[in-house]
Image (tube, grey):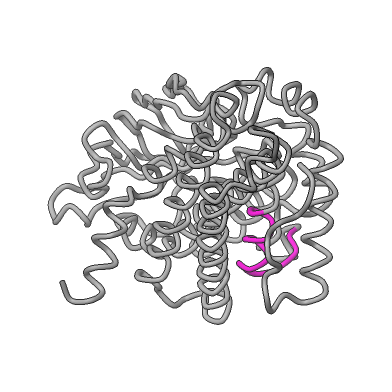
C-alpha cells in the first residue's frame, strides 16, 4: 500500500491527529507486508492475533473510551472511530476488539464497581469479551429470545442455544442475554448474565464461514453462574441493550469505513500500475470515473460516521436511532461497493488469493448482515420519519 488517499477528518485535535498517525505507523510496521499478514493470521484463517492485541494493550489503545480508573484513556467515540478506521485500514488482525468494546459499554453503563474493575480492567489489558444475543429463531427479531434463565438459591442456571456469536472462541466471558420471565411481552423479562467460557455446561463450536474463524454456536446446558454475574437489573435486559445501540452501530460503521478505505487504496494502486494497450488502466475514462465515484462515497461516509461520533460525545445518553442506523447502513454498503468494484477493476487478480482484494470482498459482504441487517437499519430510519 503506498499513499494515504483518505481526506483528513476535519475537526480533529492535534492529539487525535497524532493518535491516527501512530496507529498508521504501528500497522505499517507490524502488518505492512503480505508476508507479515499471512503469518499473523495463520494463512488468513485466523482473524485475531493475540500477540498483536496485547501490543496494542501495552500502548493503552484498547481502552481508548474506558475511564482512566479502569486503565483506559477516557476518550470518546471520535477517538474510538479513529482507532477502528485505521486498524481496519491497516489490516491489523484484532477481530476481538469491536465486540469487546460493545461489552465494555454495557459494563460502563450498568456494572457495579466490582464488575467494572474486573471486566473493563481486563479489556484494557488485552482480554477479549463477547456478547450473545442471536438464537436460531431470534436474529433480527431479538425480542424472540428463548434461552432460559432460572434463579437458584445461589445464582442462575442457563439453558439454550446462541448462534452467530462473534469472538466467543477467543473470549474470557460471554455476556448472555436470556429470558428470565415469560409472563410479559417479548421485550420484558430479559436478563444479562456474564458467563465464563470455562464454566461447566457451556460448549462453544465454531461455524465455518468464507471469512475465516469468527463466529460460533454457543450451547448452554444447565450452566450455573453465581448471582454476582448478573449485569444491571433482572428483567431489564431489553432496555440495557437499547442503551448501547448508538455505540454498537458506530463501531460497525467505523470498521466498515476502514475496510472500504483499504479496498479503495489497493485498487487505486493497482490501476495506476497495471498497463493495458500501452498505458495504465487508470487512465481510461471508465475506470477513472469509477474511482471518482468511490472516492466521493467514501468521503460522504467519513463525514457521516464522525458527525455521529461527535454527537455521541456531546451527550452519551442521547439516543440517535436515525443517525446511528444511517451510519451503519451507509458505511457497510460503501464497503461492499469499494470491494466489489475493486475486484472488478482488478479483473482476475482481484479474485486471486495473492492479493488482499478477495479478502476485502469476503469481509465486507457480511457487514450488511451482522449487528442488525441493513434491511432492519432501513426500517429504523423510516420509522423516525413517521412511516
Q: Is residue 299 above or below residue 200?
A: below
Tell me residue 37's x, y (percent): 74, 28
Q: Is residue 140 above or below residue 247?
A: above
Which quarter of the figure has residue 306? bottom right
The front one of 65 and 43 is 43
The front one of 323 and 65 is 323
For the record, the magenta segment spans 72-85
Magenta span: helix, strand or loop, mainly?
helix
Q: Is residue 302 magenta?
A: no
What's the residue at 14%, 56% (across, down)?
A: 185
What's the residue at 72%, 23% (across, down)?
A: 38
Question: Is there any visible trace of residue 155 in the rendered image?
Answer: no
* Horizontal side of residue 255 vs 86, given as left or right: left
Question: Is there any visible trace of residue 172 in the rendered image?
Answer: yes
Tell me residue 103's x, y (percent): 53, 50
* Horizontal side of residue 7 vs 318, given as left or right: right
The front one of 285 and 90 is 285
Specify the quadrant that holds the C terminus. Answer: bottom left
Tell me residue 360's x, y (percent): 56, 36
Tell me residue 156's x, y (percent): 37, 39
Specify the quadrant that holds the N terminus. Answer: top right
Q: Count numbered badges in the picture.
A: 0
The front one of 132 and 147 is 132
* Horizontal side of residue 316 vs 80, given as left or right: left
Q: Farthest residue toward the bottom?
A: 314
Q: Is residue 348 above or below residue 89?
A: above
Q: Is residue 83 magenta?
A: yes
Q: Is residue 152 above or below residue 347?
A: below
Amino acid at each position: 500500500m503506498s499513499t494515504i488517499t483518505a481526506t483528513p477528518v476535519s475537526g480533529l485535535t492535534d492529539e487525535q491527529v497524532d493518535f491516527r498517525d501512530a496507529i498508521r505507523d504501528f500497522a505499517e510496521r507490524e502488518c505492512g507486508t503480505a508476508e507479515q499478514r499471512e503469518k499473523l493470521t495463520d494463512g488468513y484463517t485466523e482473524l485475531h492475533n493475540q500477540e498483536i492485541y496485547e501490543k496494542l494493550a501495552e500502548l493503552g489503545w484498547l481502552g481508548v473510551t474506558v475511564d482512566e480508573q479502569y486503565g483506559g484513556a477516557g476518550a470518546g467515540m471520535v477517538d474510538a472511530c479513529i482507532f477502528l478506521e485505521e486498524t481496519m485500514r491497516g489490516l491489523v488482525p484484532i477481530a476481538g476488539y469491536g465486540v469487546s468494546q460493545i461489552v465494555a459499554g454495557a459494563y460502563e453503563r450498568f456494572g457495579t464497581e466490582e464488575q467494572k474493575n474486573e471486566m473493563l480492567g481486563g479489556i484494557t489489558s488485552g482480554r477479549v469479551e463477547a456478547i450473545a444475543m442471536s438464537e436460531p429463531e431470534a436474529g433480527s427479531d431479538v425480542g424472540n429470545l428463548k434461552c432460559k434463565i432460572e434463579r437458584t438459591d445461589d445464582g442462575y442456571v442457563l439453558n439454550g442455544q446462541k448462534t452467530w456469536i462473534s469472538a466467543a472462541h477467543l473470549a474470557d466471558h460471554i455476556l448472555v442475554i436470556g429470558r428470565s420471565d415469560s409472563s410479559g411481552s417479548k421485550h420484558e423479562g430479559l436478563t444479562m448474565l456474564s458467563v465464563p467460557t470455562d464454566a461447566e455446561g457451556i460448549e462453544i463450536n465454531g461455524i465455518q464461514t468464507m471469512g475465516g474463524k469468527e463466529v460460533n454456536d454457543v450451547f448452554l446446558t444447565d450452566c450455573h453462574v453465581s448471582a454476582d454475574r448478573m449485569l444491571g437489573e433482572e428483567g431489564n435486559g431489553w432496555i440495557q441493550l437499547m442503551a448501547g445501540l448508538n455505540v454498537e452501530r458506530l463501531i460497525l460503521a467505523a470498521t466498515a469505513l476502514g475496510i472500504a478505505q483499504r479496498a479503495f487504496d489497493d485498487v487505486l494502486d493497482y490501476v495506476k500500475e497495471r498497463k493495458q494497450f500501452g498505458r495504465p488502466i487508470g487512465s481510461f475514462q471508465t475506470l477513472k470515473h469509477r474511482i471518482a465515484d468511490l472516492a466521493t462515497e467514501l468521503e460522504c461516509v467519513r463525514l457521516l460516521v464522525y458527525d455521529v461520533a461527535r454527537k455521541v460525545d456531546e451527550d452519551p445518553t442521547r439516543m440517535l436511532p436515525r443517525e446511528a442506523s444511517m451510519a451503519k447502513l451507509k458505511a457497510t454498503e460503501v464497503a461492499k461497493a469499494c470491494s466489489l468494484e475493486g475486484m472488478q477493476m482488478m479483473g482476475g487478480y482481484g479474485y486471486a488469493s495473492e492479493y488482499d482484494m478477495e479478502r476485502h470482498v469476503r469481509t465486507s459482504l457480511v457487514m450488511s448482515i451482522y449487528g442488525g441487517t441493513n434491511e432492519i437499519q432501513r426500517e429504523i430510519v423510516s420509522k423516525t420519519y413517521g412511516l
